[in-house]
Structures are given as C-alpha cells and as structure tokens.
Image (spheres, helix red, strand yellow):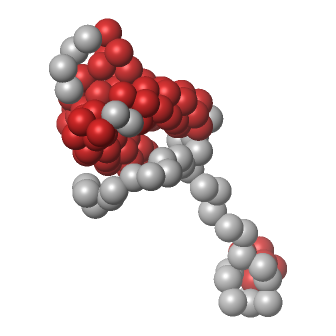
Amino acid sequence: MDEQNQTNQPGQGQPVEAQPVTALSKEAKQWAMFCHLAALVAYIGIPFGHVLGPLVIWLIKKDDYEYVRSQGREALNFQISMTIYCLVAALLICIGIGVFVLIGLGLVDLVFIIIAAIAAADGKDYKYPLTIRLLK
C-alpha cells in the first residue's frame, strides 16, 4: 500500500481535520445590521416604520443570506412585540401611567436596536429580550 494513501484516509487511526466553518460575508453582516437599524425610521415619524423598515429589508434579502433571514426575523418579532406593548401602554394612559410606560418602551426599543445592530455587524446572533416569537 502507498504511504500517502494510508495517511489521508479517515478511519485509519489518523485524526480527521474538521472542515473550516464558513465565515459570514461582509454583506450578510451589513444587511443584518440594516434589518435592525431600519426600525429607527419610526423615530422620524413614519407610521409603523419600526415594523415596515425591517420587513422590507428582510423580504428583499432573506433568500440571499441565512444570517439576514434569522436576524431579520428576530428584528421583526421584537418590533411586533414592541407594537403590542405600546398598544397596552396606550390603554394605560387612562389610569395615568401609560405615558411613562410609553416613554420607557421607546427608550428600551432604541437601546436594544443599537445593541442588536452592533452584534449583527460583528456577526453574532442577537436575541432580543422581552420578545414574543411570532415568526418562526
């Protein structure tokens, strides 16, 4: 038997080298970051922009990059959850605490969007807290 054939065959007592994990492309990281940051359009006055922004990017790029698919879905779930929380807070305005809850939700939303965008730019999977996972 040939000496080269013996050393290259798995199962012959030789450790098999693991295949390198494919790194995320720069474009995938950027589009995932844009999915998170697109929610900020609500802060410039576009109604439901916090949901529409991530939705548009997710629909356009979800088939191109698996990372964008997962992070876009995460951004959408969080923004839909925030919409539900804001509707409940709007109802609480009647008893006087809704305004404070709405302000708090706005700040929490802003902070988590920025944290998620930074994590996505670094290629890390980010899971928002307080999220109702409606999209699977």
Asked whether residue 71 is in view, the answer is yes
Task: Give percent across and percent down for residue 124.
Answer: 59, 45
Q: Nearer the viewer, residue 89 or 113?
A: 89
Residue 39: x, y in percent?
35, 26
Nearest the viewer among 113 and 72 is 113
The residue closer to the viewer here, 29 or 133, is: 133
Which residue is painted at 26% across and 44% down in the image?
88
Q: Position of residue 73 (x, y in %)?
A: 32, 47
Look at the image and tell me whether residue 76 can be seen.
Answer: no
Reply above or below: 118 against 134: above
Please say if 79 is above or below 118: below
Which quarter of the picture shows residue 97? Answer: top left
Instruction: Count the numbered circles shown.
Output: 0
Q: Is residue 74 left or right of residue 136?
A: right
Q: Name which residue lies at 25% across and 57% down.
A: 134
Q: Quadrant of residue 52?
A: top left
Horizontal side of 40 relative to 104 (left or right) equals left
Instruction: Name the outermost residue toward the front.
Output: 95
Q: Quadrant of the C terminus?
A: bottom left
Q: Who's the residue at 78% across and 79% down the image?
A: 15
In terms of depth relative to the viewer, which is nearer, 83 or 4? 83
Query: Which corner quadrant holds the N terminus?
Result: bottom right
Identify whether 91 is placed above or below 132.
above
